Amino acid sequence: MKSKHLFITLILGGTIAACSSPFDVTTLSEHHTDNTDNYQINLTSISFEGANKKSNEMVTPLNVRLKALNDSLMSTTIADADSFFTSYKSDLETGKIKYPQPAFRYELYSSDTAFIVSEQIISTLSTTYTFAGGAHGNTEFYALNYSPTEKRFLSTEDLLDMSQQMRIDSLLQVNFTNPDNCFNTDPTLAEVTAINVTPTHLRFTYAHYTLGAYYCGAPVVEIPLESLKGIYLLK
């Protein structure tokens, strides 16, 4: 059973008055579900639509990248699930396997978040959970920081003065919360999985196992931009 729902959401004042800038963008959110005997997919994706031709052209590369990521996640899940269960059924019929088909389906849950939408930067995070049997699934994080003005993706070096890594590590540790002392490793820039920009903070996401056991979760450290003066490079 498949279903799609499209609705429009305006995020973080992404529209700027035309008298000061031509950048006028709305955030679209699309929900896709796909359920079969082999897999279950639940995906919420975002894209950006300009109110004028110039704005649309400014966000096109980001839309292409976001769509490619989500398409890849879905196609990989479907291909892997169908291949696994087809092979299992064949082996069962030929007697290579004597156990009945596993009582699970492949799973994909993915959602996109936009933390800031402006002419200077759009910062998104795709949070993806996949399950293919076993004790638990796998959660991955994909951050995209994109400059509409320059029509290019920004690297960590575009965001941060990397010569001050020791100071960044110190700020990460000062702003790190460790409830019940579950995590046994201090956060550092070298170990971070995803970096996002919000209107007031830089947001550092760490994958499971990076700072502690799986059950501790995926920690997030937020550093106020005020504390990053001289380090954060965007103006």
Image: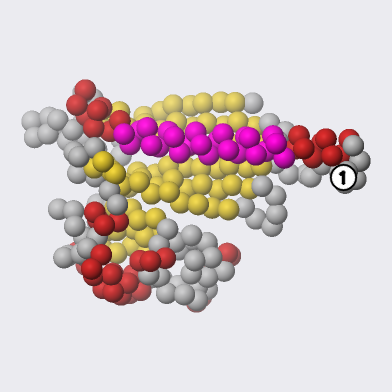
- Residue 63 lies, in percent from the top left, at 35, 33
**Vertical arrangement, residue 33 with respect to residue 95, above or below:** above
Figure colour scheme: secondary structure
Q: In this view, does 98 lie to the left or right of 219?
A: right
Toward which corner of the image does residue 77 lie, by quadrant? top right
Q: In this view, does 221 lie to the left or right of 23?
A: right
In the image, residue 66 lies in the stretch drawn in magenta: yes
Q: Name the residue under label 1.
A: 97
- The residue lying toward the viewer, choosing from 85 and 112, is 85
Q: Residue at x 39, y 55 (%)?
A: 194
Quarter of the N terminus within the rendering = top right
Q: Which residue is drawn at 44% across and 34% down?
A: 68
- Residue 20 lies, in percent from the top left, at 8, 35
Is residue 15 at all visible to an observer of this figure? yes
**Vertical arrangement, residue 150 with respect to residue 219, above or below:** above
Q: Is residue 152 left or right of residue 136?
A: left
**Vertical arrangement, residue 3 with respect to residue 177, above or below:** above
Q: Residue at x 31, y 47 (%)?
A: 145
- The residue lying toward the viewer, choosing from 113 and 88, is 88
In the image, residue 201 lies in the stretch drawn in magenta: no
Q: Quick one: which residue is furthest to the left in this view? A: 19
Is residue 171 at all visible to an observer of this figure? no
Which span is picked out in magenta?
Answer: 61-84
- Residue 38 lies, in percent from the top left, at 70, 36
Q: Quick one: which residue is furthest to the top in this view? A: 53
Q: Which residue is drawn at 24% across and 54% down?
A: 158
